[in-house]
Image (tube, rainbow, N blue to C red):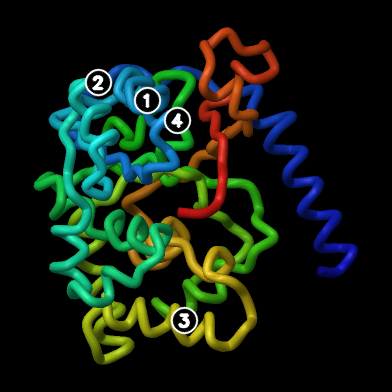
């Protein structure tokens, strides 16, 4: 990366963290119905115990259903019973999407990507808020405007070039410098239907087959590892940016990264953190 690009990235990061985050406010309660789906891996169990109830409390819309989607893991099932949310076995849906053999070989990261891109069917609701289990809102947070447009949360400029893969999937798209990797997103059935149709027409094969083939080709090229290739949030966000320009607004996500002890602890966070909209604690791996 050139010095000019590095400087711009640092300036934009400073603008977001030090300036835009100071203008974050609580959203008003909203009666538009949404479902809430949280993908959880066994390694995320402790974080999900803290984050899922906080998501439920802070999503500003009327929640019609909350579900954790995860492998058939007894500890995760027990957690769902403990906190009063539905448990969905991810394997049932992944097998239907990709077949049993491919599902058995998939990394957890990829499984969650396909599940998010199928959220309305899984949750049986047209509007599904998906939030990663290592993230939660600190304040009442909306994903729809009062007039029903989608709120796309814009993340910080990412040094990883996810947009290159996004354009391989959907074709040329504007906003290369815009990152939608905000660890949460509202997935709408009508936008996903249109996205899948575009992928299938562009690649002349089913959207899942095209998605998995492009990932395999990118990984075999040696240009990047699996984590550095693709993002479902980036693909969906840039598709809407390009093909549904009157059906969304963007908003800076205002996310603060926490150490594990803070993320798993109480909400007695310092003022410099409490001004943010989201907090997260990220780890890689299955």
Question: Which residue is at the far left?
Answer: 124
Question: What whole-number distance in Å separates the C-alpha atoms at marks 4 and 2?
Answer: 13 Å
**Which secondary structure, mark 1?**
helix
Which quadrant would the C terminus be assigned to in this image? bottom left
Residue 47 marker: 4
Q: Which residue: 26% across, 91% down?
A: 204
Residue 168 marker: 3
Q: Which residue: 83% across, 58% down?
A: 6
Dot 4 or dot 3, earlier in sequence: 4
Residue 49 marker: 1
Residue 15 marker: none
**Which secondary structure, mark 3?**
helix
Question: What whole-number distance in Å separates the C-alpha atoms at marks 4 and 1?
Answer: 5 Å
Task: Identify residue for label 2.
Answer: 83
Task: State whether residue 27 is above or below residue 162.
Answer: above
Looking at the image, is mark 1 or mark 3 nearer the viewer? 1
């Amino acid at each position: 990366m050139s010095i000019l690009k590095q400087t711009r990235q640092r300036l934009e990061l400073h603008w977001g963290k030090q300036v835009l985050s100071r203008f974050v406010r609580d959203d008003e309660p909203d009666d538009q119905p949404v479902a809430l789906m949280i993908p959880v891996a066994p390694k995320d169990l402790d974080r999900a115990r803290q984050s899922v109830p906080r998501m439920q409390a802070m999503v500003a819309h009327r929640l019609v259903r909350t579900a954790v989607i995860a492998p058939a893991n007894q500890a995760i099932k027990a957690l769902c019973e403990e906190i009063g949310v539905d448990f969905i076995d991810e394997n049932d849906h992944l097998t239907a999407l990709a077949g049993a053999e491919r599902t058995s070989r998939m990394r957890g990261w990829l499984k969650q990507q396909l599940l998010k891109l199928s959220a309305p069917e899984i949750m049986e609701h047209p509007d599904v808020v998906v939030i990663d289990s290592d993230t939660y809102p600190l304040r009442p947070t909306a994903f729809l405007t009062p007039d029903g447009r989608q709120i796309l949360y814009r993340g910080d400029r990412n040094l990883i070039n996810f947009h290159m893969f996004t354009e391989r999937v959907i074709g040329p798209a504007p906003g290369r410098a815009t990152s939608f990797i905000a660890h949460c997103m509202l997935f709408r059935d009508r936008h996903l239907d249109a996205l899948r149709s575009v992928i299938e027409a562009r690649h002349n094969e089913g959207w899942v087959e095209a998605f998995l083939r492009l990932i395999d080709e990118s990984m075999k090229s040696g240009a990047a590892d699996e984590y550095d290739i693709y993002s479902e949030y980036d693909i969906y966000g840039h598709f809407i940016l390009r093909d549904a320009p009157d059906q969304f607004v963007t908003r800076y996500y205002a996310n603060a990264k926490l150490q594990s002890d803070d993320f798993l602890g109480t909400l007695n966070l310092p003022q410099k953190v409490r001004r943010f909209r989201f907090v997260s604690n990220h780890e890689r791996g299955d």
